Amino acid sequence: MGRAIGEFLPSAVGVAISPLPIVAVVLMLVTPRGRVNGPAFVVGWCLGLTVAGAILLAVAGGADASTDSGPATWVDVLLLVLGLLLILVAAKQWRGRPHGDEDPPTPKWMGALDAFTPFKAGVAGVVLSVLNPKNLLLTIAGAAAIAQTGISTGQQVGAYVVFVVIASIGVAAPVVVAFAMGDRAEQLLQRLNTWLVHNNAVIMSVLLLIIGVKLIGNAISGFSG
């Protein structure tokens, strides 16, 4: 299982530090329902990743993701495609980054966070965890990394649980801070939100480029092995 964790770790970290979901949970925490909506968002986030992982690992298992000599050829092809897609997304993020004091655009739904119920917050967590294209690509890469190791089903489940835990650190940390610091956390969370909003594109473009190159390298190694 250690090998699987080592393989998926970059993808899990990529999901964990994706700025947009962190901004969303931070904004929820400073609303009147923040102490309920924040945890609901995290629960929805974990649920989305868990369901996606269960589906992806089941598909990979049925398609024989590993052979006696290593990962199946289709896994290397998938990693190559994912790597190229991540590089394309990174380039798009970089081109769309704000310049100077320019205010980056924010999704319209973020303006409605004050009116979110716990259910809507949970749904937002599900949507941003796996229906966000960037996170979906990284989650697929993480599940493929686990499946290609050929470990048992129980070990795959254990490895993916670790993936979910690591991938949830980014959205869970502000909730922990809010509960631990109480009213004192609001100013800290506001500063974090401002920084993430202005640096979202740069953070994601660099991160996705690094992960994309790694996936392409893994695929090339598999083809030549």
Image (cartoon, rainbow, N blue to C red):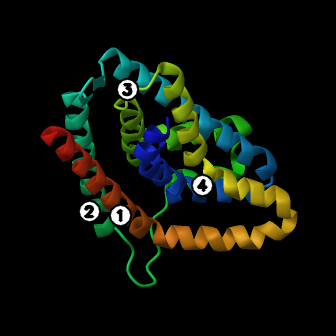
**In front: label 2 or label 3:** 3
Alpha carbons under labels 1 and 2: distance apart: 6 Å
Secondary structure state at the residue bearing disc 1: helix
Q: Residues within 10 Å of mark 2 (few under 14, many from 20)?
A: some
Considering only order in the chain, which callout, 4 or 3, is on the residue closer to the N terminus? 3
Q: Are marks 2 and 3 in contact (CB under 8 Å)?
A: no
Considering only order in the chain, which callout, 3 or 2, is on the residue closer to the N terminus? 2
Quadrant of the image occupied by residue 90: bottom left
| Image disc number at residue 170 | 4
Q: Amino acid at mark 4?
A: Gly
Residue at figure coordinates x 63%, y 70% from the top left: 192
Alpha carbons under labels 4 and 1: distance apart: 17 Å
Q: Are marks 4 and 1 in contact (CB under 8 Å)?
A: no
Secondary structure state at the residue bearing disc 4: helix
| Image disc number at residue 205 | 1
**In front: label 1 or label 3:** 3
